[in-house]
Image: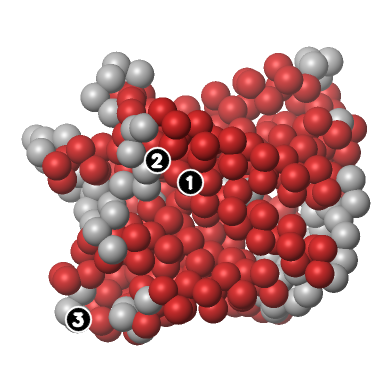
Amino acid sequence: MEKTNRLDWIDIAKGIGIVLVVFAHTLVPQIRESSTAAGFLWIFIYNFHMPLFFFLSGWLFEKGLSHYTNKPKFILGKLKFLMLPYLTFSVFAYVFINFALKIDKLAAVLQGGGYTATALKDAALQILTYNGHIDQHLWFVFSLFIVFLVNILLPKIMKSKPVLLVLLALYVSKAFVHYPGILDYTASDLLFFSLSRVMIADGKPHLINRSPLRIIAVLAIFITSNCIYSYFYVTQMPVGAVKALLYVIRSISSVAGIMCVCTLAEYIQGKAVSKPIKEIGLYSYDIYLMHAPFLVSGSMGILLSYSSLPAPLCCAAVLIIGIALPYAVSRFIVRKIPVLSVLILGKSFKKTKNTPEIKLNESI
């Protein structure tokens, strides 16, 4: 029963996280540039929603670590599960955009979003390094693969407390250094993955208990630290030591946000409201891969350019579409056709009589 409950709260947390991801992607640059409040809300969400997924991935990795005795097999499995969809969606993005730029009305929307045609050689290099990649949301699967690779090759080192300090320093170093390509993301992501592993190793699988005072304290820390960083982000980001301090504050807001989401997930598990959220969480990887950039950002661009609907209504409508359509496509089409499920999701799904379980070696 304990194992099921923990999987339940993880799926619920993933459901909350992916809803935040899709909503944040509805806040396209056109909206953020015209509204300071929208820009603030966008970075407020970004400060913790992706760290949440790396934390949950670290939790699942640590719980299944004893089964990963064959490291080459594990690495090949992650190559298939993460990098095959990365390649599939990358190729699709470049082909689609190069084609769509030849259609006048679509070209106007794409050019407004900063998209341009890319030569084959440049596209291949961008896909390989992620430097200048045309499909920006794919950083997650690429970075997650690198994080898994580092942790499976150095399993003991990457869950030690001294390494957490090193990873925090690496995270803060981004205030001064822009790392090349995908490494600029991985420099941040390693911290939250290892933090989860360290907490489990210390016998703390749950982040906080349900003490009202502790919940209020963590929520206050989350809101305060996140607001501080977000304010400077949307106004004027300082440089030097002050910027490094803000990165420390941002890491605090990320951890506090993770704690708040996981606490909420634990609290509502078993309640009626958790069922649709858990269902969304079971398809979070599918939704993440399929919703961006064309379905959500593309729909927002078209609605803002060719309709008179107010921006909040556009965001609400596209949020629903961005979750419901990938969910339906994956559940009723992709997961039922082996070749599609392998190319799009990195694995094939077999029909079972029981409710599908999330295996401990799955990433999100």
Quarter occupied by residue 62: bottom left
Left or right: residue 169 versus residue 264 is: right
Q: Are marks 2 and 3 in contact (CB under 8 Å)?
A: no
Task: Name the mark nearer the viewer: 3 or 1.
Answer: 1
Disc 3 element = loop
Per the rendering, the mark at residue 258 is 1
Find disc 3 in the rendering and name its residue: 70
Is 94 placed left or right of 209 in the picture? right
Q: Name the residue rendered at 78%, 22% in the picture.
A: 311
x then y, percent, for residue 265? 37, 34
Circle 1 — which element? helix
Q: Which residue was labeled with disc 2?
A: 262
Residue 262 vs residue 342, the one in the foreground: 262
Badge 3 vs badge 1, beta-carbon distance below 8 Å: no
Provide residue 336's location: percent of width, then percent of height: 27, 42
Amino acid type, mark 2: Cys
User: Does the residue at mark 2 contact the one at mark 1 (Cβ under 8 Å)?
Assistant: yes
Q: Amino acid at mark 1?
A: Ile
Q: Is residue 278 visible?
A: no
Q: Is residue 64 left or right of residue 37?
A: left
Query: Which residue is at 57% across, 70% downward?
Result: 168
Vertical side of 128 occupied by 309: above or below: above
Q: Residues within 10 Å of mark 2 (few under 14, many from 20)?
A: many
Sequence-wise, the earlier of marks 3 and 1 is 3
Q: CA distance from mark 2 to mark 3?
A: 31 Å
- Asked if residue 311 is positioned above or below residue 24 in the image, the reply reads above
* Residue at (67, 40) in percent of width and height: 224
Q: CA distance from mark 2 to mark 1?
A: 6 Å
Mark 2 falls on what kind of element? Answer: helix
Rendered-image quadrant of the N terminus: top left
